Amino acid sequence: MEGNEPITASLETTFDQRSMDIAARKILSYGDMCIEIGYGMRMLNRYMSGIEAVRAGIPFSSTPQGSEKERAKSSVLTFDENGTFTGALSGDDIVASREIGKGSIAVINLHGVMNSQDDVCSYGVGYQVAQLRAAYGNPQVQAIIIDVNSGGGEVTAMNMMMQAISERNKPIIGYGHFAASAAYGSISATDEIIAAGEIASFGSIGAMMAIDMRVVDFFKRNVKFFYGENAPRKNAGLRGAIEGDFTDIQEDVNMYTDKFHDQVKGLRNLTGSEKQIKETLSGEMFTASEAKRRGLIDGVGNMNYAIKRARFWASNFKK
């Protein structure tokens, strides 16, 4: 950071692309270990720019945030009887449509922060789960590609995606641009993971929890909680935090991290020595070649390559 200028400075002035880039650069200058924080800052700046636009009188539907759901919609790639690509269709119900050509491939986007519930700007993962199940039930769809560009999100959202992927009756390819944390955990359950180029990044395999100490302090000063005496462990983490004891919260984060690690190790053939596997699961991000060397992904290529792999899996898939 240059001088003593706080990172939040750009958030308190103008919320344009330049300020977004400045905020991201200030954090990313600390190195790859801050890549998720940089991602989060970009999302925060983007959200704040939308607020400023609405305050200035621009209709919400005209802001980038207002069109987020439109961009998140799934699409279907269609082919003729010879397997030649004929086009792409998108829309609310396109994945479930029986009017698409036989042998189509559904492309489902997993972009942005993963939440379990919808919000005003974006879908929760319930949308992707519904699209997956629609693809499972459509005999015209031969395979599915999940296009990923996400820094992760809620552990519940990851679990929803992983459970839905585990129900598949046709192959699913994970196609990643940036797949961190819960986003990587989600596609770790697919049949094959392909990086969308050499600078695509994967990893951040671990759990985290952020505590706003201003909220904790507010509760401590202003709120009195009463719990049933026969439920002494109810909200133990919050109760401890109010008293300055974060032991229960740390134990929860450790537990979720251990379960996350176990899931990835059970789903992916991680390679290398025990020490290297520990490094792979340390929370670090890896670009494509290194991710492949460690067993986090299976290949590198463009969407044409992902389609080729999806069709290969479709012809060899065993339910």
Image: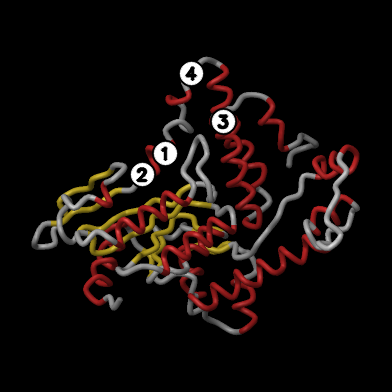
Instruction: Tell me if mark 1 has few (under 14), some (14-19) or many (20+) residues whose alpha carbon lies within 10 angstroms of its own.
Output: some
Coordinates of residue 132 in the picture (x, y in percent): 36, 58
SS assignment at label 1: helix
Coordinates of residue 94 in the picture (x, y in percent): 26, 47
| Mark 1 residue type | Lys
The answer to which of 62 and 302 lies nearer the viewer is 62
SS assignment at label 4: loop
Distance from disc 2 to disc 1, alpha carbons, whole Å, reads 7 Å
> In what quadrant of the picture does the N terminus appear?
top right
Coordinates of residue 307 in the picture (x, y in percent): 27, 61
Q: How is the image coloured?
A: secondary structure
Upstream in the sequence, badge 3 or badge 1? 3
- Point out the residue furthest to the top here: 57
**Residue under numbered circle 1:** 69
Upstream in the sequence, badge 2 or badge 4? 4
Distance from disc 2 to disc 4, alpha carbons, whole Å, reads 24 Å
